[in-house]
Image (cartoon, helix red, strand yellow):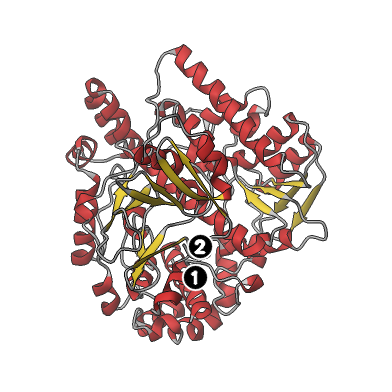
Amino acid sequence: MLDEGRRERTVRFGVAFDVPQAMRDAVAALPDEVTARRAAEELANTDGSGVAVLFDGAQTIALVPAWSGQALYWAVKDGVLLLSTSARSIAKEIGTAVSRNFLASFLVDGLPLGVASRIAPWDGVQALAPFEALRVDRNLTGRDFKARPIQIPPVFERPGESEEDVDNAVAALRQALFEATFRWCERGGPISCDVSGGVDSAANAYLLRALHVHFDATHASSSSQYNLDDMWAKRIVNDVGAPAAFYPAIGSTGLTYDASVPFPNGYIPETPPMWCDSEGYAQALADRPRPAGVQFTGLGGDELFAPLPAMEWSLAHQAPLRAPCLAVRYCLNRRLPLRRGIPSIASKIEYGRWIDRSMRELASKGSTSKDDLSWSGEFAYPSYLSGEAKELLHAPFDAGSLQPMNRDRTVHQVLESLLGQAAIIRQVNDMLGRGRTTWASIFVDPGVVRAALALPLKMRRHPFLNKPMLYRAMRGLMPREIFARATKGEYSQDSYETLYARRKHLVGDLADGAVADLGLIDREALKTKLSMQALSSEFLFELKRLVAAERWIRSVR
């Protein structure tokens, strides 16, 4: 292992464990008479940091817990297997360059996690997806060993439908929320909580109040007069009685469209960060004279509790007898022709086949078909991508053999989205924590995720309330009015203001930048787009990825 710090070795029921100290409690909590495969499945569904290696005499399994926000990278040098959560560390060891395949795939917004997470940022380095482990033969240093990825998807209890089952599941979710909050608080030190004005961050504040924890509230303002988040944040802060600090608008401090600024504290992220719109706000929190020991955020709440695109598909396949009625209602509600909507709901295409078909469709048409009920959303080549980059966009593995993280498409989408949020939290902590402040979200806690997914999917919808599952769990702790908000915070004006402030610099930064030097973008197409008076929201997302890639590659070259 490279860059792994202090480790602990133990043997339980014939299985040898070599794990970071952060995983010690997770190993101790494993069931009796556990096999290496079963232990790997249990550890993968935790949030400990670092690489765990398990050996039972017949097989060796290496993995990184999925909820840590890290990934497992590996390579072979002189017959020795190198394992690390840092692809850059392995790249230095084997002497290799940034992967153009990785950068080309990163520039495609919406590329499924099943593809993106398996493409390493450096040539010669292999990447494993979340809930995937590496199986090798008995001798880690033998020259004839074989290594292959194995998928270890999480298992969740099937939700019960009776009133008693639902009540018990709601109580379990409430308990999981309290336990996750308390675990972060018992670390000691000052506590602060972001109160954005939305439901999820408000839930954090009311949970802290219910636990009688003293905390400070923080809020990043909006520059739009039509955004009601500021008003709701003040109401929530007044209701919980917490001292509050209000920070400038995110649009005035974000670095979304600035490729020239170096990453703070000498930190170089493993992959380009996609949260730079909040970087100025996060930096201000880290630079407080008396920084918090834990900073609570609402990241992951939308993914865990809100309706997701594939819900109609899931509901129809859970109740086949009601599927025809659900299909017709779906088409009517969305004004879709029956010939389009019904095949989407009836589709049983496997995840691997869907990935393979989508990548072929991307290569031939430049975009995939829009189908809200498929495994993931549509994706397309960005308008500035060069022909050379398009040739690089292929999956370096057998896509057809891939398995989903869950057979239910909605649950799979929940997990994909939450794992993305966990990776963001990890990056924020690595970049700005500096051993003082830990950014945390209870909504990516494995226990909370498990409890939320034990509730029926239909509970994600309510005619008058946002996130009714969370409302049921927080009933009596948090005002109903917060869940009944008719509007959601809108920050597109902040994005446009940030872009227009940097627009004159972007041509030089990007069209003549490091990504362009690698032959991945069409310089003239990009210049034409940037010269247009009005820019589409789709182009904003394309541009965010290009700026993130440019900023990242400047730091690693």
Q: Secondary structure at mark 1?
A: helix
Residue 549 screen position, x and y as percent: 46, 72
Residue plotted at (36% across, 74% down): 99
Q: Secondary structure at mark 2?
A: loop
| Mark 1 lies on residue | 548
Query: In the rendered image of this protein, does residue 161 appear above or below residue 356?
Result: above
Q: Nearer the viewer, residue 530 or 546?
A: 546
Callout 1 environment at 10 Å: few (<14), some (14 to 19), or many (20+)? Answer: many
Residue 404 screen position, x and y as percent: 30, 44
Q: Which mark is residue 278?
A: none
The three-letter amino acid code for the residue at tag 1 is Ala
Residue 203: which quarter of the image?
top right
Residue plotted at (62% across, 27% down): 474
Q: Is residue 389 left or right of residue 26?
A: left
Q: Earlier in the sequence, mark 2 or mark 1?
A: 2
Query: In the rendered image of this protein, does residue 502 appear above or below residue 20?
Result: below
Residue 132 screen position, x and y as percent: 36, 49
Residue plotted at (25% across, 66% down): 394
| Mark 2 lies on residue | 274
**Residues at discs 2 and 1 in contact (Cβ within 8 Å):** yes
